[in-house]
Amino acid sequence: GAVVSQHPSRVICKSGTSVKIECRSLDFQATTMFWYRQFPKQSLMLMATSNEGSKATYEQGVEKDKFLINHASLTLSTLTVTSAHPEDSSFYICSAPPGTGIEETQYFGPGTRLLVL
Amino acid sequence: GNSVTQMEGPVTLSEEAFLTINCTYTATGYPSLFWYVQYPGEGLQLLLKATKADDKGSNKGFEATYRKETTSFHLEKGSVQVSDSAVYFCALSDRYQGGKLIFGQGTELSVKP
């Protein structure tokens, strides 16, 4: 099946620094990618929809200046957590549907665990 | 808005027991329904899906039927194995909302030998 990778898989940073997480579709092109956040033993919460060639669409309550999303190409989306604080510590997961973005099968990356000290 | 509700976990079963994880949904349109599984330390994997009413999704011995009349998509397996221990997520997607997935809260399954 299709493969989505994330890098890094785990990152520890100091409070106030910025962290960039990459999401890549390895064997297909994705005009749309989704970014989720998962707290321990909780569900995935959609943060934003990353659109190639246009601005990301953020869900209600998600600070767009805090979580910068750039969909640089048809195979790469990045999420930058700016001025990270301990409450940003979480598991961040991306997903991508092949094709135009309205396909219903999504492929998930393995996730990035962020710990802010 | 659209939402998904799953039965709370954790669920603990003995090997070869019958499994049911309940899932109900609320949607304004005609969503597609999914079950995803997250094994310890891994990312989410699609387990099965159904795209219209009365469809049955099946994979690896798991089944779920899209019931429009009861707005449900319960996951079942006749005989669970230790290797089925994981967190299971019910989700829906409405293509008219750009394919966004709305997840239930997840149900942790632990199967004991």
Image (cartoon, coloured by chain):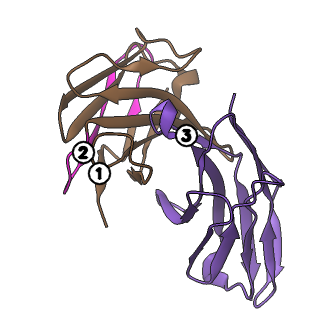
Chain colours: A brown, B purple
User: Gap in Å between the C-alphas at discs 3 and 2?
Assistant: 24 Å
Q: Does the magenta run of residues contain A54?
A: no
User: Gap in Å between the C-alphas at discs 3 and 1?
Assistant: 25 Å
Asked if residue B82 can be seen in this view, the reply is yes
- Do discs 3 and 2 share a chain? no
Q: Which segment is the magenta one?
A: A12-30
Residue A102 found in image quarter: top left
Q: What residue type is labelled 1?
A: Ser
The chain to which mark 1 is attached is: A
Mark 2 Cα within 10 Å, few/some/many (few <14, many 20+)?
Answer: many
The chain to which mark 3 is attached is: B
Using the image, tell me which numbered label, if any, was put on residue A24.
2
- Horizontal side of residue B15 vs A69, given as left or right: right
Please name the residue shown 49% across and 12% down the image: A63
Residue A33 found in image quarter: top left
Q: Earlier in the sequence, mark 2 or mark 1?
A: 1
Q: With respect to residue B62, does A16 lie above or below?
A: above
**Residue on which the image places disc 1:** A5
Please name the residue shown 69% across and 27% down the image: B1
SS for dot 1: strand
Residue A101 found in image quarter: top left
